[in-house]
Image: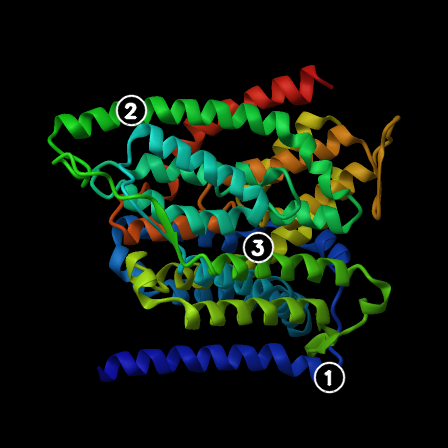
Amino acid sequence: MIAARRRVSGKLIVIVLLLIALIVPAFFGAHHEESDELGQDLSLWLCLPFVGMLLSIAIVPLFKVHWWEKNLLNAAIGWSLVFLVPFAIIYGPGQAGHDFYHAMLLDYLPFIVLLWGLFAVSGGIVVKGSLSGSPLVNTVLLAIGTVLASCIGTTGASMVMIRPLLRANAWREKRAHIVVFFIFLVSNIGGCLTPVGDPPLFLGFLRGVPFFWTMRLAPILALNVVVLLGVFFLMDRRLHGKEIAAGRWPELPLDGSPKERIRVYGLHNLAFLAGIVGAVILSGILGQLDSWQDLGLPFFYGLKLPLNNVIQMVLIIICGILSIMITNSEYHAANNFNWGAIQEVACLFIGIFVTMIPALAILHARGDQLGLTEPWQFFWVTGGLSSFLDNAPTYLVFMTTAAALPTGAGALTTTIGTIAPSLLLAVSAGAVFMGANTYIGNAPNFMVRSIAVQHDVKMPSFFGYMSWSGRFLIPLFLLDTVIFFVLLQ
């Protein structure tokens, strides 16, 4: 016990000293370069801590699962230090402090507050009834979640739909494929039709892309959904047959009594869910007004937490707290609700957001040097990077790159320039669809995985999941490329 306390105290001392080192230069007017200038100078080796963070997520749980679960925050802080210390030595503590607080204050904080709010509210929505977990029922639930994703966002739809799906299939032994296809469709691809669906599209909306312009992705969405749901149904029917043959049956009335009606409890949480979505939209609209551009809470290094972000986070927190206070505790119990999934995401993404600072800076500064000119190139480069980096800034980088290219008739006018619709379509599809390629490609992916694990689903490892996406998504994306970004151009 004493040794454990000493280890914790030692870690706290290191963290406090680091924060002091990153704060003090701000009071002496420490110089820091803008991201474009810095990105031109950064060496690729500074991205190695980000690679190390990803490999830790992928490999360590395979051998030290219990240690990993207890040391998520330590791993995130450790890899953050592996990046920040040499970065501060080379470019100065002022630059390191500025970029660290920029990532935490302006990127991570709104990100995790939004996820927390959606997680808290959705945990109080319970679907009860005789859902058997049959191939047809599972396919219908996936289809419903896919439609919801464009209405309440991929994270909102994922948190609302994953528990009913898991509960319907609790009697089955092999369930991992259900969750994997759920991540493909509900947590990613389904969010492409509106700016509310996925953060990259919302950023496009804030920069002048019309709200319903993203409906142009509907044909691509339709093809992907039909193919994936069809493949899923055939796979689930085969595995469902094996479950029945092995003597496993759903817990449904077998004496001829009527099935329990499907009912949804905690519907008042839909109002809070709408409040969270409304807070995000309100924040985006306010942030575009000239009178709000300079309003914010001052912080170190001349940084400001924009007032519209403050309003957004306050409203989300209020919705989450009210939901928890008002919702019957029995609903949370029925959902096996606990804070484990959001804690895991919160810890890991600290390390991800910090260590990907140099990768995003390099991409932002040198993205126009990649020689991209064709829609299929934008689709794959945007998507490939969005599979591992935050897809929102990646989208902005290649949206900006596309705006610098010559345009023909029908070009779309935005605040960053005119863009050929075919290029913007490719960037949008790549950023949204290919977030499904890895567990970290989109925020709800990891949350869904964590919730599934808590429900005793044997989920594939990081690389194991990528083998699923490699078998089912990559061939589908190649088909998208040929049809929509080559033949129809």
Front of the two marks 3 and 2: 2
Residue 213 x %, y %: 73, 37
Dot label at residue 439: none
Residue marked by disc 1: 28
Quarter of the rendering occupied by the C terminus: top right
Q: Residues within 10 Å of mark 1 (few under 14, many from 20)?
A: few
Q: Tell whether label 2 touches label 3 (CB within 8 Å).
A: no
Under mark 2, the amino acid is Arg
Residue marked by disc 2: 237
Residue at screen point 45% across, 54% down: 53
In screen coordinates, is 354 left or right of 287? left
Q: Residues within 10 Å of mark 2 (few under 14, many from 20)?
A: some
Instruction: Specify whether residue 466 is in view.
Output: no
Under circle 1, the secondary element is helix
Residue marked by disc 3: 356
Under mark 1, the amino acid is Phe
Residue at screen point 22% across, 82% down: 1
Q: CA distance from mark 3 to mark 2?
A: 41 Å
